[in-house]
Image (spheres, rainbow, N blue to C red):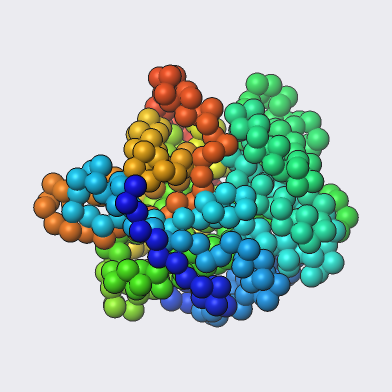
Amino acid sequence: MESKKFLLQERDIPEKWYNVLPDMPVKPRPILNPATKKPLSAEDLYPLFAEELARQELNDTDRWIEIPEEVRDMYKIWRPTPLVRARGLEKMLDTPAHIYFKNESVSPVGSHKLNSAIAQAYYCKKQGVTNITTETGAGQWGAALSLAAKHFGLELAVYMVKVSYHQKPYRRSIMQTYGAQVIASPSMSTKAGRRILTDTPNYQGSLGTAISEAVELAMSTPNCKYTLGSVLNHVSLHQTVIGLEAEKQMEMAGEYPDVVIGCFGGGSNFSGISFPFIRHNFSGEHSARFIAAEPASCPKLTRGVFQYDFGDEAGYTPLIPMLTLGHNFSPANIHAGGLRYHGAGSIVSQLKQDGLIEAVDIPQLETFKAATMFARGEGIIPAPESSHAIAATIREALKAKEEGRAKTILFNLSGHGLIDMAAYDSYIAGDLSNYEVTDEDVARNTESLERII
C-alpha cells in the first residue's frame, strides 16, 4: 500500500455548515401538506421534528449556518477525517487518474452518519425532548443515532428494516450496546406495520415501511420527536462538513477534483461530499462533474419519475418533490441495505433534473468486485453502500486510461464493512446475484402517484 494521507488539525473542523439552497440556480419545489396541497411552514413540521431542525429544513436564505459549540466539541472526537490518495488502487488499475477518498469510516460508529446524528440529538435535547424514534436500513444511521442519543440522555427506538435486521445482526448489537431499542420492521407494534404484515406476512421490509413505523410512534408518544439519517435538507446540511474539509485537503494535495462521487440512497453521503464543491460550479470558478452511484435494484435517480411523493410507505410524511420509484416500491434484498430507498431528496432531485449532477446505477456483483479490489489495494474493507462509489470511481479511472489523459477523482468512503462480512462471504462463495428493475415495474408502481408536478 502506497497511499498518502492529507490531514487537517482540530482547528480546521468547519465552524459552519454550508446550505446549498441559496446558491441553487433553480430551487426545489416546496414540501406540501398532503391534505391541502399547500406549502408547509416550519411550524407545520414542529409536531414531528425538533423546532430548529424544522427551521433548517425550510431555510433557503442563509448560506452558512453556525455549528453549535457542543456539536463541534463532539466532532473533535474523530474529525477532521483523513483525505487519502489511493495510490494502491491507481496502481492496480494502471490508470493515469489520481484517485482520492475522504475516509469517513474512521468515526466511532464507522460511518459518516454521526455528523447529523449528533446535531439532531443535540437540538432535540436542547428543546427538552426526552424520546426520539428513527428508522435504519443497514444499521449505520441507527448505530450513529444510538451513540448520539446516549450522549445527550435521550431514549431511542429504532425500526430496522427486517432483511437487514437478520443480515446484519452485529450492527443491531451495536445499537443495543449503546442502549437503543431495536425493532425489526415491519412489526406488530404500529398500525402501519400490522397493516403491511396482514397484507404480506413474509414481507422483509423497506426504508419506507420503517419510516412509517418510526413516524407513527413519534406522533403517538408524549415528548417524542422523529429523526432521520438521509433525504431531507437539514440532514444534507449537517453532512457538508465532509466536503468542506475535503476542499482544504485537496488544496493541500495541490489538486482540484474533476469528478466528485458519492453513493446514493436518499442523499446524505452524496450531498455531504458534493455540495461544498458544486457551489464553485454555480459561481463559474470550476466545472467539476458530480456522480451519484445508486444500486441497479433501486434506481430512483436513473429510472424514477420526478413527482411529489411520500417519504414513507404508509403516507404519513409530507409530500416531497422527488425522483421516485413510488413509495410502495419493494426493493430487492440486496446487501447495501442503506441504499434501498424509493426516492431521492428534493435538492438532489432538482439538481438532477437541471442536469447539474449525473447518476449511474450499479449491479450488486460489480459493487462487490470493486470493494474487493479496493480492500486489496488500500487495506480498508468498505461497506457495501460505499462500494457503489468505489465502483463508479473505477469506471471513471478506466475511462481515463482509455482516453490516455489524467483526471482527478474524489469519492466519499462513507463507511467500513467490518460488520458486513457475511455479505463478503456470500460474494466469495458465488452466492450473490444481480437484481434489475424493469420499466414495467417502475411504471406500474408510479402510475398511482398524484400528478402535482
> Image point 76% across, 64% down: which residue?
124
Position of residue 89 measured from the top left corner of the image (x, y, whole percent): 30, 46
Position of residue 102 measured from the top left corner of the image (x, y, whole percent): 43, 58
Q: Is residue 429 visible?
A: yes
Relative horizontal placement of residue 3, taking residue 64 as reference (left or right): left
Relative horizontal placement of residue 37, taking residue 267 as reference (left or right): right
Position of residue 328 measured from the top left corner of the image (x, y, whole percent): 57, 37
Depth check: 124 or 21 in front?
A: 124
Depth check: 49 or 363 in front?
A: 363
Relative horizontal placement of residue 116, taking residue 222 as reference (left or right): left
Relative horizontal placement of residue 414, taking residue 406 as reference (left or right): right
Q: How many marks?
A: 0
Q: Is residue 19 visible?
A: no
Position of residue 96 measured from the top left corner of the image (x, y, whole percent): 18, 53
Write down the quadrant of residue 153 in the picture: bottom right
Query: Is 193 located above or below residue 55 in the figure?
Result: above
Query: Is 80 located above or below residue 189 in the figure?
Result: below
> Image point 50% across, 37% down: which residue?
336
Write down the quadrant of residue 198 in the picture: top right
> Image point 65% across, 52% down: which residue?
144
Write down the quadrant of residue 170 in the picture: top right
> Image point 77% across, 59% down: which residue?
151
Furthest residue to the right?
222
Query: Is 72 located above or below residue 162 in the figure?
Result: below
Furthest residue to the front?
1
